[in-house]
Image (cartoon, rainbow, N blue to C red):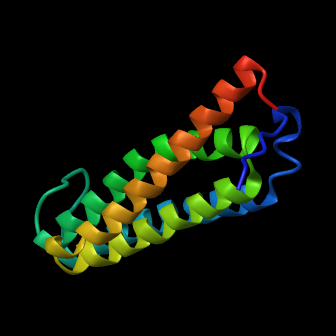
Amino acid sequence: MALVFRNPESMLSSSPLTAGVTLLIALLMFGTCFAVGKGRHRYGVAAPAVTGHPVFERLYRVQMNTLEWATMTLPCLWICAAYVSDVAAAALGGVWLVGRVWYAVGYAKAPGLRAKGFTVAALAFGGLGLLAAGGVIAQLVGVK
């Protein structure tokens, strides 16, 4: 299958799948915030403390780790959509999202259950980054 690189000028209006995945990522980030707030109440961890009950601490780490990875993933997602394909970006973004949910649910249960979801999300991020970089390089050197 040959990659067909896109013209970045029409990115926003022609990337509805990527936009949908972006909204789902925002929903995931909201969900992790909500879980931390609920955990504060349930386990008696008053703000601004971020330590206390072990389950709360895991919920907090899920939120922070998801935020850290989302700040790297979202630009790669949209660069991939602009320079490569809406479908490719959305597919890898969807895999990233599934991995992050798997990570979050696993980590909330027990720290040892986070690794598989983390790995899936990290591999999807790597794919997005490589495709995005390839698309930008192709544009720079004039490959269509």
Q: Is residue 140 above or below residue 75?
A: above
Q: Is residue 99 left or right of residue 77?
A: left
Judge by depth and name the residue closer to the eye, 64 or 34. Answer: 64
Spot occupied by residue 15 in the image (x, y as percentages of width and height): 80, 52
Spot occupied by residue 120 in the image (x, y as percentages of width and height): 39, 64
Q: Is residue 3 above or below residue 8?
A: below
Q: Residue at x 82, y 45 (%)?
A: 12
Q: Residue at x 71, y 19 (%)?
A: 140
Spot occupied by residue 105 in the image (x, y as percentages of width and height): 33, 77
Spot occupied by residue 113 in the image (x, y as percentages of width and height): 21, 76
Q: Residue at x 50, y 50 (%)?
A: 127
In the picture, the quarter occupied by the C terminus is top right
Q: Number of numbered discs present?
A: 0
Q: Is residue 130 left or right of residue 61?
A: right
Judge by depth and name the residue closer to the eye, 108 or 84. Answer: 84
Q: Is residue 70 left or right of residue 110?
A: right
Judge by depth and name the residue closer to the eye, 18 or 110. Answer: 18
Q: Quadrant of residue 33?
A: bottom left
